[in-house]
Every structure is written in C-alpha cells, then in structure tokens.
Amino acid sequence: MQPGPRNLITDVPGVLVGQASHAGMKSGTTVLTADAPFTAAVHVMGGAPGTVETDLLAPDKLVQQVDALVLSGGSAFGLAAAEGVRAALRAAGRGFDVGGQRVPIVSGAILFDLLNGGDKSPVGNAYRDLGAAALNAASSDFALGSHGAGTGATAGPIKGGLGSASLMVGEITVGALVAVNALGSAIVGEGPHFWAAPFEIGGEFGSRGPCPAPPPPDIPKLNIGPGQATTIAIVATDAALTKAEATRMAVAAHDGLARALVPSHTLLDGDLVFAAATGARPLPDPLETPYQLGHAAAICLARAVARGVFLAEPAPGDLKPCWQSLYGGA
C-alpha cells in the first residue's frame, strides 16, 4: 500500500477539508465535506466525549447520509461550530429535504483547549463563525500542524496538531484526518522517536525510525484534570459502504490511535473516530475488502497522529514546546 498523491484525506475523490483558526484564542475548527452527501458513522472509545448529532449516525436511524463532519476546539463552546457549518450549507442549498425545507445534516466532535495559554474572552461567540469560515474554505489542499482544530492542541509533554494521511488499497482510497489533543504522548519517552514510527512512509514525520532503546513500561502519572484532553478523528474512503460497514471501519481505525498515542482511550480523553464513505467504488469483495479498509484506516490514523505532532509550530504564549523546536534541528 502506498499513499495517494497528496498524502491527505482529500486523496479520497470528492472529499474536501476546510479550516479556520483564531490565533488569539489558540483554537480553531476543521470541517470535512464532499461534493454530495455521504455515508457516515462514529465510534467513541474515550471516557469524556463531546459531540453533536452523533446518535443519527447509527445504522438503524432514518437519515442515511450527512453533509459535513466537524472537528473543533473550544470544549462545549466549540459545538457551535456545527451550527455555523449548518447555516452555510443551507445557504448553499444543501440539506435533507423535509417538506421543501432543507436541513443540512452535520455531525461533530470537540476537544478541550481552554487551558493552553490563549485569550479565551471570545470563546462564547467565536465558533459559529469559525465553522462557517472553515466550510467556505473547503478545498483539496489544507495545512497540517497548528491549524484548524489542531491550532491549540497538545499531546502529552508537547504540542499536538492536525494530521492527515492516505493509502491506496488497490483502486480504493482510504484517508485519515485527526486533531491530536491527547492526554497520552505521541513520542517515546523524552523523544524524538514516534510511537507510530513502524508505520511511517517516505519520511513523512522525520524518518527517525523506531526508538532504539525504548524505556521499560511504566504507569504514567496523571498530569491534567477531567475533560482536558481528547483526540478526534475522521477516516474516509471512496468505497461503497453501508452505515454498519462504516461503523466497523471506525472501530478498526481506533487501533491507529492506540499505536500512536500512549496511553490512549483513557477515561479523561474523549477519543472518537468518525467514518465517511462516498460510495463511488463498489467493493471488490464483500468480506475481504471491508477487512482491508479497516486495516488501512488504522495505519492511516497512526501516521496522521504523528504527522500532526511533527508539523506543529511554535506560537507566542504557548505553554508547551513543539516537536520541531525540540528535535527538528537535531
């Protein structure tokens, strides 16, 4: 398996990603949308999630497709980003037709970045505008690291960020998008090696390789309080998946978080993975292909986590250093 041409989730044909950041708040929003409504699902493994419109993603619910998925900073305030996305989609004529009224279907999740050193005075009103701006910026190309939902993210002892990666599974494309704001660490011990190093392709996060002498396993000490973490992600494909099959892909993708963040899925994280499927390509095999797509989604997500942390940038007022400042010139 090799990455697509951009090594981004937008290698999945028809998928677009837009971002908006507020430098003063050290926060932002990232939106995934597509040329047409797409099948979506979700799986939550963290103990402290914050979500909007995720119940409707269950396979037995009426609505079978969505118009956008939102990842946002801001804790509970960031849920308003989905409102901004919904309003912008309606203005564009998108949405589920209910008696002639268009109701855009937008699901989202938030991470906690309220204690990262930014000025939080605008936090109550900013996210609706950030959501609309992110949707309006949707494109095939987008920046990684300290952008969008990853603007003020942290990951253990260093800054987190927004990451993405892709893989080709035959003619089918799989991609991952993640805002890394974890209680756990993406680096082994004091660094600079990434836990995800065995899955790196083409030097995409520094070519440091696996840690040559990893520290012995230990029990990490808790260094933050409840609700102050969360890694939120999307995996996407152009395969024709049902909501049930997309749910299984989201479940499998969580393996990527466990490979790239130690520890992950804690009681204090709200770790969550959305899955999106545009349906453009039929499954070559109804059993083997979903199995392969789940495996590819996990690999993509592990790589995306490391890329987001690797590409994070320093900013005034940061409370934690970034990987590049610590190790980039070593």
Image (tube, grey):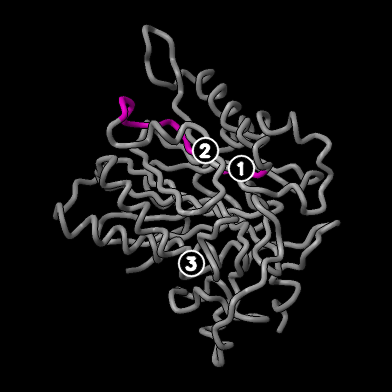
Q: Position of residue 207 (x, y in %)?
A: 54, 80
* Structural distance between the alpha carbons of marks 3 and 1: 20 Å
Q: Which residue is at 47% across, 42% downward?
A: 16
Judged from this view, the residue extending furthest toward the bottom is 213
Mark 1 lies on a secondary structure that is strand
Give the label on residue 50, or none: none
**Mark 2, other Cα within 10 Å: few <14 / some 14–19 / many ≥20:** many
**Mark 3, other Cα within 10 Å: few <14 / some 14–19 / many ≥20:** many
Q: Which residue is at 38% across, 49% downward?
A: 236
Which comes before the other along the chain, label 3 or label 2? 2
Kind of residue at badge 3 = Arg
Magenta highlight range = 61-73
Q: Quickly name the residue at label 2.
A: 108
Residue 63 among magenta residues: yes
Residue nearest the viewer, comparing 116 with 196: 116
Q: Which residue is at 37% across, 35% downward?
A: 57
Residue 89, compared with residue 255, is above or below; it is: above
Dot 2 and dot 1 residues touching (CB under 8 Å)? yes
Residue 89, compared with residue 218, is above or below; it is: above
Q: Quickly name the residue at label 3.
A: 303
**276 to the left or right of 90:** left
* Quarter of the figure with the N terminus: bottom left
Q: Which residue is at 62% across, 62% downward?
A: 183
* Structural distance between the alpha carbons of marks 2 and 1: 8 Å
Which comes before the other along the chain, label 3 or label 1? 1
**188 to the left or right of 273:** right
Residue 173, compared with residue 136, is above or below; it is: below
Residue nearest the viewer, comparing 166 with 241: 241
